[in-house]
Amino acid sequence: MRNVGIISVGYNGRFVSKRPDINMPELVQEAVENALKNTRLKLQDIDAFVEGNMPTFEGVNYPHLWFSDHLGAVNKPVLRISTGGTTGMSAFHGAYYCVASGLYDTVMVVGWEKHDEGDAQVGLAGIVFPEIFTLFSFGPSMAGPGAGGVTGGGSTGGASFQATSYLAGCGGDVAHIDMIAAQARSNAALNPYAHLQHPGCTPEDIAKTPMVSWPLRFGHTCPTSCGACAMILTTEEKAKRFADSVAWVTAVAVGATDATTANLLDGQLNDPAEQPMCRKMARKAYEMAGIRDPQKEIQVAEVYDGFAFQELMWSERLGLIPEGTGPERVEKGALAIDGDMPINPSGGVVSTNAIGASALVRVAEAALQIMGTAQGGHQVPRKVHNALAHGWGGLFQFVTITLLGDRPRHR
Amino acid sequence: MTQERAENETRVVHDAWDLGLYRWKVEADGLKILVDGLREGRIVGRKCGRCGTVYVPAVSYCRKCFIDIEERIDLATTGKIRTFTVNLADVRGNELEEPQVIGCFQLDGADTWLMGVLVIDDWKKVRVGMRVRARLRAEPKGELADIEYWEPLPES
């Protein structure tokens, strides 16, 4: 398998709530243009494209049919990959396979979402409509004390269940989620592309936001953002020719377990906070990259935190910090940009969430850290030799992991 | 950073998908077994003969062994809370007048979780691991609402 390097990261611009002036193809095009600007590549040097978003949010089913020309992909191969929340990283893995396999030399991958053209609640509900309608046909409680019980009573339900179980398992409490959320939003203020930027955000600021679905507050929850991220991957030889800095892909791993939202049709077996596949696939990724002690050898990680507590949970499940130590680490500031194990210096998904882009942005941010080019003050102070990027998606069941290094992996 | 184009170059087009057009097929025999059992005041699931995993609602094949399973099993109405949340505000942030505790409960003897409402005097008392009981309707109709709600078991 060939070594694959990331030679460019391009955002369309700062992620924002609305872009009323452009449509989806134009959003994608902005990111493609910006990714090309950082290299000596021309559009014709791109051999193939991989693209993804989560179409339930805009209600346009095969959007790439609409914008292959805006991608710059006319007369070129285009592979569309859409896997829910993990879309961005699944698409990245697809682009990686394209180059690592030897089939293509230089591939561009784009992840994006234009939330202002749809409704996020409807988009999320659309995932479970068949289930909900089935449950309705079996006469669930619609009135009285039990009303709404079998449908979770509200939309943040799934993540709340995961959060409660996580806190019970590690002995943390809501205050720890306030702390990590405050860290995320202040980190975002050091990232010119992040959506929700709150310089100097404190846990008290977060604690002022309403408690929606205990233990999750408004301030613990991601926004819906419009934005696109494009990256270019290529071979060792072309990396030297076309770019000045490279982040090398040293491992990719994917895992799936059963849906864990206690839906009555499927008989949930697993605790959503346990995530056994994340543990297993992280170990597999470390092995592939030749990393024996991730807590020492990884200098920064970008994990998918749609909800702030997930930074703590995923850090443990990925083996970046010992199991159960999330609360204590955030208390000590160990996860901050200048901490022992910086997590989400970009501000993470809880500050910026264009769903189809978010898992790709984790790789992009990890790459910027390796290259030393993260702007605005969120570059970690230590030299980054290894970085981890993580995504999750579906009904808390899919996990994707990518490891990047400052040198190509040699077997 | 963001290249704004002239607003008059962009039009807004409205549309919608009619979900009523779709006829999804859904496997629901586990729910049927559950509601039929509830009509008789019983909670019924299925057990895998090979690995012993107990599913409620029942499933038609074991998720671990990937074999068809038939054997039915009665579950107790008691169990424990595995996780929960408390609805305190709606999605726009407006505080709810009456907080509602939604829990995932694991019945004694079952390996799967059931979602439902926990009725308790003070939501702040709820803990993962708390012992609970499913409160069944005195006059069941053979529907999910025959599980009226869940309640904490008295401390023993």
Image (cartoon, grey):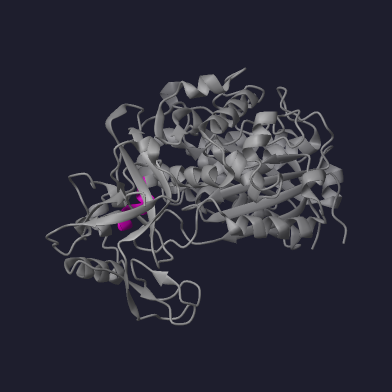
Number of dots carrying numbers: 0
Residue A181 image offset from top left, x and y in percent: 56, 30
Magenta: main secondary structure equals: helix
Residue A73 can be seen in this image: no
Q: Name the one closer to the observer, A213 or A72.
A: A213
Residue B21 image offset from top left, x and y in percent: 24, 56
Q: Quadrant of residue B25?
A: bottom left
Residue, far top? A200
Residue A44 can be seen in this image: yes
Q: Quarter holding the N terminus of chain B?
A: top right
What residue do we see at 39% from left, 38% from top? Answer: B125
What residue do we see at 17% from left, 45% from top? Answer: A143
Q: Is A282 drawn above or below residue A221 in the view shown?
A: below
Residue A163 image offset from top left, x and y in percent: 50, 43
Residue A158 image offset from top left, x and y in percent: 43, 47
Q: Name the one closer to the observer, A274 or B110.
A: B110
Q: Is A111 drawn above or below residue A329 in the view shown?
A: below
* A174 left or right of A391 in image: left
* B108 left or right of A311 in image: left
Magenta highlight on residue A93: no
Residue, far front? B156
Magenta stretch in the rendered image: A125-131
